[in-house]
Amino acid sequence: RYEYLLLFLLSFFPYFFQHVVDTGPVIFTTTSIPLLYWLMKKWFDNLQLKYPLFMALIVFLGIWAKLTYLWLLPSIGILLLILLLENKTSLNRIACKKIVLHILGSGFLLIILLGCIFLSTDPHNSNRFPYLEQITNSKSLSIHQLFQLNIIRNRGVVKALFNPFEATQRIFVVKEPNLITAFYCGVIFLFVPTCLLALRINWRDKIKPSLFYFASLLTFTITLYTERAWAMHHTVLSFPFFLLSILAVIDLFRKHYAKKFARIAMISAIIFVFLNSYFFINFPKQRIKEHDDWSKIEIHKQLQNPELANDYFYVVVDWGMYYYQGLYGPSFQSVLYMEPLNSQSQIDILKQMSREHNRK
């Protein structure tokens, strides 16, 4: 039932809040995972080429929007593996041949599309390939560092994983984790492995939720391995696979404990909502960061003036105000972002732009 799924996502505090405040492509990235899985299921049902082609397009858009989408590719491969295992008894030689051809065709399309962006050059320097440079310049932890507790526990993505209040870090000074936070993380993140160990069913039925859970761990490990990953909007990229693992476990209860399922589902839902309510109630009590003080609204009202918006450049030295003014200001305004603004060369550039565009 999609309405229950929606309520589940709205109740999951770190997932919900991160989608509310993030101005990047997080919503597209996280939503694309269940969409890709649904398309894979439809593809295995009728083996029509349109589904893998559409999947290739979604993956391309995800990578184009932000290269962090590359972190998800191994786990997307696990989604395909899950469905191959589910359908292995019903796939004959002709179907397998068709699947291989479809994968090759959609893979070729994806390579062509990615070639358009990875081989694109800087408009001001044809010898530079910005997308490729982002990959080659990316720094990672060493394998040795991944096993050093003092390094791992100080990583921002780890702090975000074990403190749901980190989802609010763009706006608030984040509340330190406490016993309630620890209990919450224990219940939420150990739900799937605990249920899989407790369920007395055929081990083959546990493969699907186990692979979903492994996919979430793999994505988080890749995030952890990447040096520049630091916040909840990176950590949350592993959550779609984690949520799929929870849904798969719930489906096991529905299939194997049909008579008790309604009671199990009700108790689980009450506990889940109760635990998340702590964060919904307490996040507004955190101290607001200076650059997100409500006085920003008053500045925004002043900048709405049509004469100012039409005649001046708005130079903003904080990204939060830049996004806010850029999104909600007049359509004819010109908002520039320079952080930090502390050199004569930047002033000279602004003066030159002022002359070229006839703005003060």
Image (cartoon, helix red, strand yellow):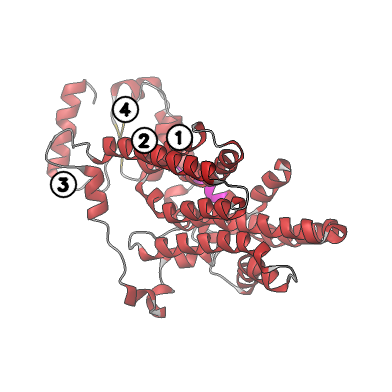
Say which element carries label 4: loop
| Quadrant of the image containing the C terminus | top left
What amino acid type is highlighted by mark number 3?
A: Ser
- Circle 3 sits on which residue? 343
> Is residue 218 shown in magenta?
no
What's drawn in magenta, residue-wise?
A: 17-23
- Circle 4 sits on which residue? 334
Alpha-carbon distance for marks 3 and 1? 49 Å
The mark that comes first in sequence, 4 or 1, is 1
Q: Are marks 3 and 2 in contact (CB under 8 Å)?
A: no
Say which element carries label 2: helix
- Tag nearer the camera, 3 or 1: 1
- Circle 2 sits on which residue? 109
> Where is residue 137 shown, x and y percent of the image?
23, 55
Number of residues whose C-alpha sits closer than 10 Å to that of mark 2, classed few (under 14), some (14–19) or many (20 or more): some
Q: Are marks 2 and 4 in contact (CB under 8 Å)?
A: no
Q: Are marks 3 and 1 in contact (CB under 8 Å)?
A: no
Quadrant assignment, res 254: bottom right
Left or right, 337 with respect to 203, comes to left
> Is residue 18 shown in magenta?
yes
Alpha-carbon distance for marks 4 and 3? 21 Å
Prevailing SS of the magenta stretch: helix
- Circle 1 sits on which residue? 53
Left or right, 295 with respect to 194, comes to left
Q: Are marks 4 and 3 in contact (CB under 8 Å)?
A: no
The mark that comes first in sequence, 3 or 2, is 2
- Tag nearer the camera, 4 or 3: 4
